[in-house]
């Protein structure tokens, strides 16, 4: 039943690149990198994603890609488990499936390209917090996205694991801003009221980080409470300059898109993920037994380099 | 010279020709009665005069000048004040504001609530209405709302006052007050157009008459030179029997007995019984609590104390379904909101209380529905092309027949009628009365609430008079005279 | 307040007491919640909701509903954010006028469809909700407008404060007062209640209910437009999804504040109370240390309790007429 | 006259459907393929299953905004039960039972509490979804038995999925009840005029209560299917679906004022919406641009009959 007729003629390899949601600067940058890689390899990238970051929306988008019989799909999952049945069906129909950025459970993909390992991210953020807290000691709190967001939770877990290395730091609270500005802002205000001696606010999502930074600025706590986390230079340049977010980390989304596309195209051409896969200008990546390959440590941005990257992503 | 003249007015709604050749003249200082069967086009004419509808053809002259009335505002500027037949009441607004909607007293451009309240109180006092100008209109009864509408027509010094069946839900005393005011206005030079289906009133208040039949004027003149029979002949095209179609009753055992029934704030300690073959009339002024009593008997409301017996068995009527199971039916006074589903066809409306009978196993049959409807349209002589006609498009009297028919079809033992002939014409009224008479002769009973004294006196076997929520008197047919009944209903 | 509003104002009173009780309960758990500075923060945070809910109230009073407010807000916000990015020299006043204008036009589009074509308001605004969101994406090409791309003035205006309250709160207070006066003492305001209470009767009285709906949509739209600027300036970011789903909060605030979905009933006072009620809950829940996972549940419980309590306030008399 | 008018609505939808078919078939080479179309059906069946009872509820003059939240609650209940090793038939019973109870709560609030349904269900929407979050927090439940997958991923025969078959059968059942039984007549009457219906001896409150409960029950069924299709449960499941389901119902010609509507219309609307989403997806049009098209479609479908009615010639033809 699953044997659909092969598309006729020699067509370029088509890669479905699925974002968590459209209208998100991070994924626009990923798209940029993907186009670059596809251009070099003579492949075609179909960049798509749901309107809101939900698993159900992503499944609809995936169904459309399956129906078009793309050669490979690279997806950043809104839910690691909910996509599995759909992605399994894609693989049954001969489509190579990888996840990037935010993982799909192993049954639903051949490989996962992590922009960085969860562990490295947790460590980097913990290190940022320690650098920003006066004398490396103080109270920190996290403004997360939704309670169901997978990579948020994974990073948070790694952050908790990394914290014992910095005995001065104590994580006093985790709040959820649901990835919407007003709630993130409100939760941040509540945080500083509840913990007047807070030193660092960490947010691992762009919306949350921007809202938290604004809330701290509006509460007149700039300089007293530092904000940091994962965000894009273009979104945070202003806050780096006025010192609310002295430094933050992110991997390069352009490289991520580039790498994901490289891998997807190569898999579609018949290469195996068991062997190291080349990513051309980014070297090679090796997937471990569970199919996960990581790119490297997140890059740290501060006043010295943010202006340079602000224009890029 | 007539103050206001309408000549050769035509108006159609889609396929319905409501007015074909309507002519009317109103004279300053005179009261003209406009009469005609249900659906003759009277209200349509009123709506044209008030700027709600535009005529398709014809001319309107005010003081000899041709005018176009293209907006209700415009009618008001011309000094035309209208009391519509439909309920034009805003439940969400206070009584006072209701009276001034569209024409609020202002002070420096802002609405002046103080002036509004004062003026409202004055007019209400003239009408002898007891309710508070600040009360929300939604808390009033249907009849009281009608009083608001009349009051609205009287708030301004109008040159033309049009009243479309203002007395339909008023009782004797309110009618007197209204007529007193109308005479005063007319003496001051105002031209009045008065529409009613009650001939006593027409002869009481009006000087002139104008008769419509099927959208066209068929006669006008001085009332003094005319008679009731002649007017009816003009209206209907044939003579209508004047006496009430009441045949001597064959009384059986009591069907319903009510004892010490009370509902706080509505009525207290009501006791009566109705026997097989009997028509029990309930009379009272507006606000006497008759409607509430009927609603309790039908399970729409609950009583606080007292008992109801049907066929000698004590029953607790806690819901309409239970009442219906006991064989009780209720034709509400407000057919537009409570009686009929206006956007539905005659057949669908008739089917509503008879769902189980028409679909015993649940499956619906359009055929059985139409059959039942055809049968009753025939029996009650509902004027309509077919039973698929939407009730909204029927004239008031025919709507009322549909509401009565839907309950008769259910074959109840006890039929409660609340103002059964409100707003319906002589012919239809007679048909309804005949149906009541036939109904009781099958061994059933009727409880008829009415504010129409001739109807009460003419149709009832016994008359219960209520005032302020209590039973004041119980007359047999022989004892009852209009004086005695009115005295019991009003006397302190 | 006179007796004609007694039923409504009694409800407002009950609801006011409920709100104060809620405030007291929160203060027990977190004493500094009732401090003036914190209450000022709550009001600032609730101001946008109040402005939107006041507009929505007009729409609901005239028997409409506006599901597109949040999308309108986001689109107008994006328009002024883009303008400000391209022409940082434009002052705040022109920006606000442009926001109001853009919101008003979007509202007028809803209003015209409802008025001239008699389309059901829920269908129209459900449709425009999607359309307006889509247009933001097309306008911005999915990109964000970030803080560093906004002019100082643009950002500063909403933060100016006077006796503890920021521009946001003052705007809400002024609009609420103006709204109260306009709805109680202007002919058009009263006509809205009449048109919403009984559209057929309104027609007999020379009021065009469709026109009243149109006006309500334009006002609601213009307020949403202004809120678009306020939102973008307050959170210093504009993107496609800002205020996603906010329309339900706005409608909830109206309904909790006693606006009848069937039209004709609603007061400025009630709506402001409804908004403050929601504002207090959502500011208090994170403070009193309730687990994030329970917040929504408790939120739902409190809202239900409030509507149940105020629904029970109805008079027993003539209940059959209210059984709708 | 009414029948003609609503028939016109349905023929509008049918026309839109044909246009969609022709358009997508000619622009995308992948569209006309039974398996593709079968995949496309997954995009709307679950929502459409909830749209059926909701249509009845809206025809009866009420509304339920909490349907998606009920789905989340039912999914969480099933997930918890599955984690305790409950087998598939019992899981389905638990899912549907949770929906039924939630629906009954809505019904009680409206009929006994006398809270207007839109207010009541905005409240319970928060409550039910909040309940799902409260129980599950940031956890995921995915220990469903293998046989559970059949509801959302199984095929009845050929390319007809079990979901599609269920929807088809339910649509027929609902159409029969609404249009060919006395209960259907009562539902229309209640929506058109609840007071007159009550005065005619129809147990208005009982009908409303049952309709709310049924809406809950089928939300539970939809939750079974969605959960089975996703193979996992999180509290955010079916987030935002309430508006999509309501759009489906009103695009189907059900009057939000009550008293009017057909099941055929709702079914057509479900397919129209499902196909437009899927077809535009095939053309790789971003979802948000799709939403412009869907929004415009919604308005156009209601606007065209309205414009036609105002067209003088059309009016003349109707009267003659
Ligand atoms: N808006 C309308 N649309 C369609 N038909 C209408 C409309 N208004 C009135 N009609 C029809 O026009 C005719 C005249 O109605 P009208 O209300 O003027 O009668 P009437 O003389 O006032 O009757 P009644 O004594 O029952 O009040 C009736 O056949 C009625 O069905
Ligand atoms: N002036 C008034 N102000 C407030 N309530 C009143 C007033 N008059 C009467 N009522 C209430 O209205 C109730 C009567 O309602 P209703 O007017 O329906 O009675 P009714 O006898 O059926 O009158 P009708 O059928 O003639 O309208 C009374 O029991 C009383 O509580
Ligand atoms: Mg009339
Ligand atoms: Mg009465």
Image (cartoon, helix red, strand yellow):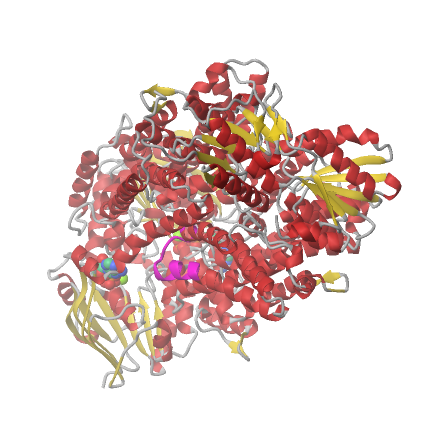
Q: Position of residue B224 (x, y in %)?
A: 20, 75
Q: Does residue A47 lie above or below A77 as drawn?
A: below
Q: Quadrant of the N terminus of chain B?
A: bottom left
Q: Nearer the viewer, residue B177 or C19?
A: C19
Q: Position of residue A154 (x, y in %)?
A: 67, 30
Which of the 4 quarters of the picture holds residue B158? Answer: bottom left
**Image point (86%, 39%), residue name:** A136
Magenta span covers which residues?
A: C109-123
Q: Is residue D14 above or below residue B44?
A: above
Depth order, front residue of B267/C297: C297
Quadrant position of ligand 3: bottom left
Q: Main secondary structure of the magenta part?
A: helix
Q: Tell me: residue D31, above or below residue C21.
A: above
Nearer to me, D142 or C165: D142
Residue A30 visible in the current orientation = yes
Q: Residue at x 16, y 40 (%)?
A: B375
Task: Give the x, y percent position of residue B89.
Answer: 42, 61
Q: Is residue B458 toward the left or the right of residue A179 in the image?
A: left
> Who is closer to the viewer here, A190 or D207?
A190
Residue C198: image quadrant is: bottom left
Magenta run includes residue C114: yes
What percent of the width, then of the height, locates residue B300?
Answer: 42, 41
Please indicate, yes or no, whether residue C1 appears anywhere in the rendered image.
no
Query: Which residue is situated farthest in the right direction here?
Result: A135
In the picture, measured across the screen, residue B139 lies left or right of residue D185, that is right
């Amino acid at each position: 039943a699953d044997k659909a007729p092969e598309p006729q003629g020699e067509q370029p390899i088509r890669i479905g690149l699925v974002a968590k949601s459209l209208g998100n600067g991070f994924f626009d940058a990923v798209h940029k990198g993907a186009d670059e890689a596809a251009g070099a390899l003579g492949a075609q990238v179909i960049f798509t994603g749901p309107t809101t970051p939900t698993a159900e929306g992503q499944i609809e988008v995936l169904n459309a890609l399956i129906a078009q019989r793309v050669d490979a799909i690279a997806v950043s999952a809104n839910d690691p488990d909910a996509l599995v049945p759909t992605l399994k069906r894609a693989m049954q129909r001969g489509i190579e499936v990888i996840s990037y950025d935010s993982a799909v459970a192993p049954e639903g993909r051949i490989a996962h390209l992590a922009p960085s390992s969860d562990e490295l991210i947790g460590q980097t953020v913990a290190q940022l917090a320690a650098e920003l807290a006066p004398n490396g000691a103080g109270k920190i709190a996290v403004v997360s996205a939704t309670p169901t967001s997978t990579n948020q939770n994974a990073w948070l877990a790694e952050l908790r694991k990394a914290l014992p290395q910095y005995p001065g730091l104590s994580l006093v609270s985790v709040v959820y801003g649901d990835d919407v500005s007003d709630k993130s802002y409100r939760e941040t205000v509540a945080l500083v009221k509840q913990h007047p001696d807070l030193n660092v606010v960490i947010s691992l999502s762009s919306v949350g980080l921007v809202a938290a930074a604004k809330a701290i600025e509006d509460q007149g706590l700039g300089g007293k409470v530092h904000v940091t986390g994962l965000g894009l230079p273009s979104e945070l340049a202003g806050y780096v300059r006025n010192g609310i977010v002295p430094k933050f980390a992110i991997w390069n989304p352009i490289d991520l898109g580039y790498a994901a596309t490289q891998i997807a195209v190569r898999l579609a051409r018949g290469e195996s993920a068991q062997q190291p896969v080349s990513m051309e200008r980014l070297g090679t990546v090796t997937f471990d037994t569970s199919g996960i390959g990581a790119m490297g440590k997140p890059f740290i941005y501060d006043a010295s380099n943010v202006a340079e990257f602000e224009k890029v992503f | 010279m007539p103050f206001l003249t309408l000549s050769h007015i035509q108006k159609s709604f889609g396929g319905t020709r409501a007015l074909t050749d309507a002519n009317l003249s109103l004279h300053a200082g005179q009261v003209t009665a406009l009469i005609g069967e249900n659906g003759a086009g009277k209200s349509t004419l009123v709506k044209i005069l008030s700027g709600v509808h535009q005529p398709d053809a014809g001319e309107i002259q005010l003081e000899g000048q041709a005018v176009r009335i293209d907006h209700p505002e415009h009618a008001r500027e011309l000094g035309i004040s209208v009391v519509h037949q439909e309920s034009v009441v805003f439940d969400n607004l206070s009584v006072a504001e209701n009276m001034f909607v569209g024409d609020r007293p202002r002070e420096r451009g802002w609405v002046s609530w103080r002036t509004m309240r004062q003026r409202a109180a004055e007019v209400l006092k003239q009408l002898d209405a007891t309710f508070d100008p600040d009360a929300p209109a939604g808390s009033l009864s249907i009849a009281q709302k009608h009083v608001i509408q009349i009051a609205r027509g009287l708030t301004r010094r109008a040159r033309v006052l049009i009243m479309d069946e203002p007395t339909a839900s008023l009782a004797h005393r309110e009618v007197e007050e209204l007529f007193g005011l109308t005479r005063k206005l007319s003496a001051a030079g105002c031209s009045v157009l008065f529409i009613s289906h009650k001939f006593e009133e027409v002869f009481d208040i009006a000087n002139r008459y104008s008769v419509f039949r099927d959208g066209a004027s068929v006669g006008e003149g001085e009332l003094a030179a005319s008679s009731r029979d002649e007017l009816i002949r003009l209206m209907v095209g044939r003579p209508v029997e004047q006496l009430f179609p009441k045949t001597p009753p064959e009384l059986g055992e009591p069907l319903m007995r009510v004892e010490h029934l009370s509902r706080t704030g509505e009525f207290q300690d009501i006791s009566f019984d109705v026997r097989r073959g009997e028509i029990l009339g309930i009379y009272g002024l507006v606000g006497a609590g008759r409607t509430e009593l009927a609603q309790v008997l039908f399970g729409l409301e609950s009583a606080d104390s007292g008992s109801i017996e049907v066929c000698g068995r004590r029953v607790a009527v806690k819901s309409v379904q239970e009442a219906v199971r006991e064989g009780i039916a209720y034709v509400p006074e407000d057919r537009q909101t409570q009686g009929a589903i206006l956007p539905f066809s005659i057949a669908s409306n008739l089917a509503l209380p008879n769902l189980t009978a028409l679909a015993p196993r649940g499956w619906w049959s359009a055929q059985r529905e139409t059959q039942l409807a055809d049968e009753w349209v025939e029996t009650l002589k509902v004027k309509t092309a077919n039973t698929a006609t939407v009730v909204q498009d029927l004239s008031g009297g025919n709507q009322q027949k549909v509401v009565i028919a839907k309950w008769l079809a259910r074959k109840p033992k006890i039929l409660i009628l609340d103002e059964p002939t409100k707003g319906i014409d002589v012919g239809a009224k007679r048909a309804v009365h005949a149906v009541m008479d036939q109904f009781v002769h099958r061994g059933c009973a009727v409880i008829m609430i009415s504010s129409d004294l001739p109807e009460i006196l003419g149709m009832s076997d016994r008359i219960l008079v209520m005032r302020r929520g209590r039973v004041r008197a119980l007359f047999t047919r022989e004892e009852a005279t209009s004086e005695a009944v009115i005295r019991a209903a009003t006397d302190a | 307040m006179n007796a004609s509003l007694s039923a409504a104002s009694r409800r407002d009173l009950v609801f006011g007491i409920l709100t104060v009780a809620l405030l007291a309960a929160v203060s027990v758990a977190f004493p500094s919640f009732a401090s003036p500075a914190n209450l000022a923060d709550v009001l600032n945070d609730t101001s946008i909701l109040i402005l939107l809910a006041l507009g929505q109230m007009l729409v609901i009073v005239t028997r409409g509903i506006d599901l597109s407010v949040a999308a309108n807000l986001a689109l107008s916000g994006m328009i002024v954010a883009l303008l400000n990015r391209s022409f940082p020299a434009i002052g705040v006043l022109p920006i606000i006028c442009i926001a109001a204008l853009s919101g008003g036009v979007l509202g007028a589009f809803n209003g015209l469809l409802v008025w001239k074509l008699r389309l059901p308001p829920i269908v129209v605004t459900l449709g425009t909700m999607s359309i307006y969101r889509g247009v933001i994406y097309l306008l911005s090409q999915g990109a964000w407008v970030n803080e560093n791309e906004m002019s100082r003035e643009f950002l500063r205006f909403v933060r100016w404060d006077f006796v503890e309250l920021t521009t946001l709160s003052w705007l809400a207070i002024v609009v609420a007062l103006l709204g109260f006066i306009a709805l109680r003492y202007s002919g058009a305001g009263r006509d809205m209640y009449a048109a919403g209470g009984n559209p057929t009767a309104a027609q007999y009285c020379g009021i065009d209910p469709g026109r009243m709906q149109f006006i309500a949509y334009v006002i609601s739209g213009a307020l949403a437009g202004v809120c678009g600027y306020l939102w973008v300036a307050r959170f210093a970011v504009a993107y496609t999804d800002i205020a996603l789903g906010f329309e339900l909060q706005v409608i909830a605030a109206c309904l909790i504040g006693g606006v009848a979905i069937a039209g004709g009933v609603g007061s400025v006072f009630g709506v402001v109370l409804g908004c403050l009620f929601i504002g207090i809950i959502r500011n208090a829940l994170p403070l009193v240390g309730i687990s994030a996972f329970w917040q929504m549940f408790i939120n739902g419980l409190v809202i239900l309790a409030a509507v149940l309590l105020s629904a029970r306030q109805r008079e027993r008399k003539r209940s059959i007429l209210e059984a709708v | 006259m009414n029948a003609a008018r609503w028939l016109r609505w349905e023929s509008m939808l049918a026309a839109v459907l044909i246009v969609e078919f022709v358009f997508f078939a000619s622009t995308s080479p992948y569209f006309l393929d039974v398996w593709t179309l079968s995949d496309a059906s997954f995009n709307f069946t679950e929502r459409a299953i909830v749209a059926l009872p909701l249509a009845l509820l809206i025809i009866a003059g009420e509304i339920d905004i909490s349907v998606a939240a009920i789905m989340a609650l039912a999914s969480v209940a099933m997930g918890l039960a599955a984690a305790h090793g409950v087998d598939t038939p019992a899981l389905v019973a638990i899912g549907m039972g949770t929906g039924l109870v939630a629906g009954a709560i809505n019904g009680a609030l409206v009929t006994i509490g006398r809270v207007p349904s839109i207010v009541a269900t905005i409240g319970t929407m928060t409550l039910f979804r909040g309940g799902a979050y409260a129980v599950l927090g940031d956890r995921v439940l995915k220990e469903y038995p293998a046989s559970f997958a059949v509801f959302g991923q199984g095929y009845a025969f050929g390319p007809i999925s079990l979901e599609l078959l269920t929807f088809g059968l339910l649509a027929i059942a609902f159409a029969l009840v609404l249009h060919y039984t006395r209960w259907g007549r009562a539902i229309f009457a209640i929506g058109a005029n609840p007071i007159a219906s009550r005065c005619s001896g129809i147990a208005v409150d009982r009908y409303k209560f049952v309709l709310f409960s049924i809406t809950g029950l089928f939300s539970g069924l939809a939750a079974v299917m969605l959960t089975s299709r996703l193979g996992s449960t999180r509290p955010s499941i079916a987030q935002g679906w309430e508006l999509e389901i309501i759009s489906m119902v009103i695009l189907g010609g059900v009057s939000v004022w009550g008293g009017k509507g057909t099941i055929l219309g709702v079914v057509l609307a479900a397919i129209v919406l499902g196909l437009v989403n899927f077809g535009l997806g095939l053309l790789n049009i971003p979802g948000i641009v799709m939403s412009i098209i869907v929004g415009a479609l919604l308005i156009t479908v209601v606007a065209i009959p309205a414009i036609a009615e105002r067209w003088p010639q059309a009016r003349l033809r109707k009267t003659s």
